[in-house]
């Protein structure tokens, strides 16, 4: 029976659970159905879920633990493949509870592993590590070396996600050592690839390349062509970072030949795109144009907008080098539209830079300057996002270290407590009088503590009244700032409309420059910074609390959340954000989706409660 545990975006193999060599003709209808569903769930998750629900009903009626267990796991896996992680976790938890009742060690470990991977996906590394640790203990107890190595790799990936590279390296090296002892060459290659990723994160491309080369040799000897091609792609990226462009191109060509032979289009697309980008770096625009065109056509056919945006930008850069600025402008503008549609700030910012250079080559300096300013705005935004993400990773790593230290401290306390109990049993009679004295002292101290607590409560109440008055004053100031901002944006919009009317009546082309300046001034207006500063003074942790619970929120989402807490009407919010009333409704709808609110949930109440 083929069994699949949740493990996204790794090179780890699909797990197989053998049937002990039983004759397939002797297997029950339930066994055959379970086997069939595990083989097809990744290709047709919705269909597998429907059949799994039927399996659960039948197994429940028959009292079949195996049928109910597999049905719950299959439903959880189907939800996971459709990226409904909360539902996936619910069903895997049901399966875990059922396996614990049956004391089924193998299934307990499997369910813990899946729940750990879901926790990792939902940015809960501490919970993921706790699940993995428990599964690891079970697998080590039964000497399941292959499963232990797999868990070590998962744990290393989790530590790598929170920048605990030292811990990740130790786990990957442990997995590598065990793989070598067990002569499991494929797992050893996976461990080497993981070590290469850590080295790359630590800005050590030479070490990363050495690990990738070792993994590549193993994959080639084992005939693992898919992993060989994937590793060649990673090596090409590393060589490009080392500015060894000719070697990178050779490596890309080898990997492309493997994926082409396999007919694996996503891999072909990745290589063609990387080779197009590399050709531009090498100053071979004709080659970049050819490769970029292949990548563009593949991306369009596959519906891969991420790759399509990159391919169009590579084509635009090649057209610029070939003195075809109009073609470059067309491709860059299309890349911008796609990047905005998929919400990729990085791809949009690259395309704006290309568009600026294309406009300059076309002799349109004013528009080129506008495009370059947009590039700079996005560049600043990306820097802030990167810094925020880095701070979040550092904070998460710090909290993880704190928890690990707390666990170690608790273990020490347990050992000390056991020693104390031994001494207490020896000296119980001698300590009896001392205990009475301690009790008396505690009673006296508690009496004093109660008196002190009462005094502190009175002082705190006085401070709270004072703070309440200050808070009311700041709320009034903040509302005034918001309304002022709304009035200013309305005035700016009226000015734009007046200028447009004058242009229609008098045809004064110079008015267009004034309008553009008004729009740009409005774009970089610093009133928002003053408003944000005033709002932060009112509630210092508001934005931190929101982003901690919903990391996907962007700057515009946070602005809207702040305005909604002030009980402003749709018209005022629209004026402040410089959008239409319908735009506010759409922004509220997108915000509700990001916050994962049900239709009946109150958006303002939820934000206020955060």
Image: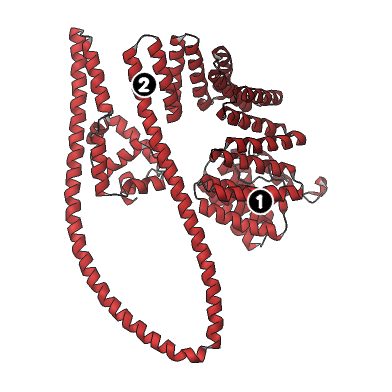
Question: Within the image, what quadrant is residue 143 found in?
Answer: bottom right
Between 119 and 212, the one nearer to me in the picture: 212
Residue occupied by mark 1:
174
Q: Is residue 357 positioned above or below 570 on the image?
A: above
Residue at horizontal 57 percent and vertical 27 percent from the top = 240
Where's residue 514, x and y in %? Answer: 22, 17
Where's residue 438, x and y in %? Answer: 40, 85
Where's residue 380, x and y in %? Answer: 37, 32
The numbered mark, 1 or 2, whose residue comes first in the sequence reads: 1
Question: Within the image, what quadrant is residue 444 found in?
Answer: bottom left
Circle 1 packing at 10 Å, graded few (<14), some (14-19), many (20+), is some
Between 38 and 440, the one nearer to me in the picture: 440
Cα separation, mark 1 vs mark 2, equals 49 Å
Where's residue 199, x and y in %? Answer: 58, 40
Q: Is residue 462 positioned above or below 536 on the image?
A: below
Residue occupied by mark 2:
372
451 sits to left or right of 278: left
Residue at horizontal 44 percent and vertical 22 percent from the top = 351
Q: Secondary structure at mark 1?
A: helix
Residue 585, visible in the rendered structure: yes
Q: Where residue 89 is drawn, which disc sits there?
A: none
Between 306 and 63, the one nearer to me in the picture: 306
Q: Secondary structure at mark 2?
A: helix
Circle 2 packing at 10 Å, graded few (<14), some (14-19), many (20+), is many
151 sits to left or right of 542: right
Residue at horizontal 18 percent and vertical 21 percent from the top = 495
Model colouring? secondary structure
Residue 566, visible in the rendered structure: no
Residue at horizontal 48 percent and vertical 16 percent from the top = 316
- Tally of marks: 2
């Amino acid at each position: 029976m083929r069994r699949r545990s949740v493990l996204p975006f790794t090179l780890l193999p699909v797990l197989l659970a053998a049937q002990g060599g039983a004759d397939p003709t002797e297997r029950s209808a339930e066994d055959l159905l379970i086997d069939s569903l595990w083989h097809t769930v990744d290709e047709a998750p919705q269909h597998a879920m429907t059949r799994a629900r039927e399996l659960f009903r039948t197994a429940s009626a028959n009292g079949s633990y195996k049928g109910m267990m597999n049905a719950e796991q299959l439903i959880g896996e189907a939800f996971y493949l459709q990226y409904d992680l909360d539902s996936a976790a619910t069903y895997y938890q049901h399966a875990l509870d059922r396996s614990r009742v049956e004391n089924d060690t193998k299934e307990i470990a499997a369910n813990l592993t899946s729940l750990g991977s879901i926790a990792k996906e939902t940015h809960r590394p501490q919970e993921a590590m706790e699940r993995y640790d428990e599964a690891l203990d079970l697998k080590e107890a039964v000497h399941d070396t292959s499963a232990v190595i797999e868990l070590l790799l998962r744990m290393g990936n989790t530590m790598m996600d929170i920048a605990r590279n030292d811990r990740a390296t130790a786990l990957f090296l442990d997995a590598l050592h065990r793989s070598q002892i067990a002569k499991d060459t494929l797992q050893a290659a996976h461990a080497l690839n993981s070590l290469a990723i850590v080295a790359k994160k630590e800005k050590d491309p030479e070490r990363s390349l050495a690990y990738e080369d070792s993994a590549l040799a193993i994959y080639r000897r084992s005939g693992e062509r898919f992993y060989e091609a994937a590793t060649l792609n990673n090596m090409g990226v590393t060589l490009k970072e080392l500015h060894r462009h000719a070697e990178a191109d050779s490596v890309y060509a080898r990997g492309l030949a493997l994926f082409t032979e396999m007919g694996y289009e996503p891999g072909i697309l990745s290589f063609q795109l990387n080779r197009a980008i590399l050709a531009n770096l090498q100053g071979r625009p004709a080659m970049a144009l050819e490769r970029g065109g292949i990548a563009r056509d593949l991306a369009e056919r596959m519906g891969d907008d991420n790759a399509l945006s990159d391919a169009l930008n590579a084509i635009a850069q090649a057209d610029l080098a070939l003195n075809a600025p109009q073609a470059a402008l067309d491709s860059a503008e299309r890349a911008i539209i796609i990047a905005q549609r998929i919400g990729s700030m990085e791809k949009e910012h690259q395309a704006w830079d290309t568009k600026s250079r294309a406009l300059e080559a076309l002799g349109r300096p004013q528009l080129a300057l506008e495009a370059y300013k947009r590039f700079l705005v996005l560049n600043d935004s990306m820097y802030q996002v990167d810094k925020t993400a880095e701070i979040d990773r550092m904070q998460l790593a710090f909290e993880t270290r704190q928890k690990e230290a707390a666990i170690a401290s608790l273990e020490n306390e347990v050992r000390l407590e056991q020693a104390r109990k031994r001494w207490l049993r020896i000296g119980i009679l001698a300590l009896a009088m001392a205990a009475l004295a301690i009790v008396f002292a505690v009673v006296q101290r508690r009496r004093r503590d109660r008196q002190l607590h009462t005094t502190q409560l009175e002082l705190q109440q006085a401070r709270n009244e004072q703070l309440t008055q200050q808070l009311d004053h700041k709320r009034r100031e903040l509302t005034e700032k918001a309304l002022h901002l709304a009035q200013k944006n309305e005035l700016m919009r009226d000015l734009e409309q007046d200028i447009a009317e004058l242009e229609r009546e008098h045809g004064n082309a110079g008015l267009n420059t004034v309008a553009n300046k008004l729009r740009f001034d409005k774009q970089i207006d610093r009133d928002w910074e003053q408003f944000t500063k005033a709002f932060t003074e009112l509630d210092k942790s508001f934005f931190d609390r929101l982003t901690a619970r919903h990391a996907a929120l962007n700057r515009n989402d946070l602005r809207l959340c702040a305005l909604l807490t002030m009980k402003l009407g749709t018209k005022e919010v629209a004026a402040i954000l410089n959008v239409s009333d319908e735009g506010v409704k759409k922004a509220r709808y997108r915000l509700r989706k990001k916050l994962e609110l049900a239709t009946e949930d109150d958006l303002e109440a939820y934000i206020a409660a955060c």
